[in-house]
Every structure is written in C-alpha cells, then in structure tokens.
C-alpha cells in the first residue's frame, strides 16, 4: 500500500484573500459574473471617451462632457470598488473564523481526501469531487460550485507528491484542468 500524500500549510488572511480571488475567477457562476461586470465597466469607459471625442462636433459641449465624465467615473468605479469591498469583507470574515492562523493538513490517497485542523475535520471520497483545477502555485478541489478546497504547492511535503496528486486527481475526477 502506498503512503498517503500529505499537504500541510498555515491558513492565513492572505491565503483566504487569494482563494476568494481565485474562486471569483474560476467558479462557473462567479467567473461569468466577474467577467461580464468587468466587460461592462470597460464598455462604459469607452462610451464615455467617445462622448469626449464628439464634443467638438456638438453644440451642447457641456452635455457631452457631463455624459462622458459620468460614464467614465461609473466605469472606473465598477472596476475599482468591488475588489476593495471584497478585500474588506474577506478580512472581516477571516477575523471571525475559528480556523484562522491554524495549520490545515490534508492527507490524500487513491480512495479519499482527508482534511484536519484543530477545530474541524472532514473525510471525503474522490467521487464527491466535482472538478480539480491545477496551476503552477496551487490546486483547487471543487466539491460543489460553492465549496472548494485550496491546496497550495508550498504545502506539499515532497516535490514528487505534486505529480502523484495530479495523477490521482486526473484518474478520479472527470473534470480535471491543468492551467500551468
């Protein structure tokens, strides 16, 4: 019987913020919302700039300038405000979590994934994992669209365990994506 893969790391506020950004980008529903809101903001900025470009050709320059300024300000706000608000919400949530600053340890075998900390533990079979996403620095293991386990590369005990984990996940999970 092969030895289980051990992944261990300290859960920090920075980790929670990174996981939140990654989940916003790669979650099917949140990724669409995030992308469409960014595209909408860019479109508003471009329309606002277009208003400035047509200013010389109109008799009501103040109206074109007002529309242009308004659209650019709204577009910039849509790009700048959500990340700031999200950061504040994540930090506030992290401060209330019972597992803040604790060591999280995963053990992975061909049959199951186990997660333990000082305040909680879970044990799940691979068949409950909906999808796995791999990048250079981390793995996201989705149990559902809203529940995700984050496995940073820095937490793997042995470098060879990265490829072992990837091989197990690829063989057990239908939706495995490698984005390295």
Image: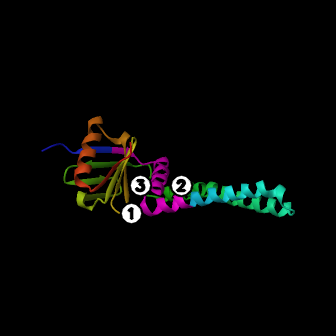
Residue on which the image places disc 2: 91
In the image: residue 105, left or right of residue 12? left
The x and y percentages for residue 170 are 26, 50
The x and y percentages for residue 68 are 76, 59
Q: Which mark lies nearer to you, 2 or 3?
A: 2
Q: Which residues are magenta?
A: 8-36
Instruction: Please say which color scheme the image uses.
Output: rainbow
CA distance for labels 1 and 2 = 22 Å
Residue on which the image places disc 3: 99
CA distance for labels 3 and 1 = 22 Å
Identify the secondary structure beneath mark 1: loop
Q: Is residue 159 visible?
A: yes
Residue on which the image places disc 1: 145
Q: Quadrant of the C terminus?
A: top left
Q: Earlier in the sequence, mark 3 or mark 1?
A: 3
The x and y percentages for residue 134 are 36, 47
């Amino acid at each position: 019987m092969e030895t289980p893969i051990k992944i261990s790391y300290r859960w920090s506020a920075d980790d929670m913020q990174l996981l939140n950004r990654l989940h916003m980008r790669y979650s099917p529903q949140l990724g669409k919302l995030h992308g469409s809101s960014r595209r909408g903001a860019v479109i508003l900025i471009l329309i606002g700039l277009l208003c400035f470009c047509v200013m010389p050709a109109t008799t009501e320059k103040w109206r074109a300038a007002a529309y242009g300024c308004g659209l650019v300000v709204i577009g910039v706000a849509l790009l700048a405000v959500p990340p700031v608000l999200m950061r504040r919400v994540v930090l506030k949530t992290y401060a209330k979590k019972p597992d803040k600053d604790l060591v999280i340890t995963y053990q992975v075998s061909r049959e199951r994934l186990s997660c333990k900390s000082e305040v909680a533990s879970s044990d799940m079979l691979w068949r409950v994992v909906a999808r796995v996403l791999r990048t250079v620095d981390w793995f996201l293991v989705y149990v559902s669209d809203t529940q995700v386990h984050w496995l940073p590369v820095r937490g793997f005990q042995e470098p060879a365990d990265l490829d072992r984990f990837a091989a197990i996940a690829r063989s057990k999970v239908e939706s495995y994506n490698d984005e390295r």
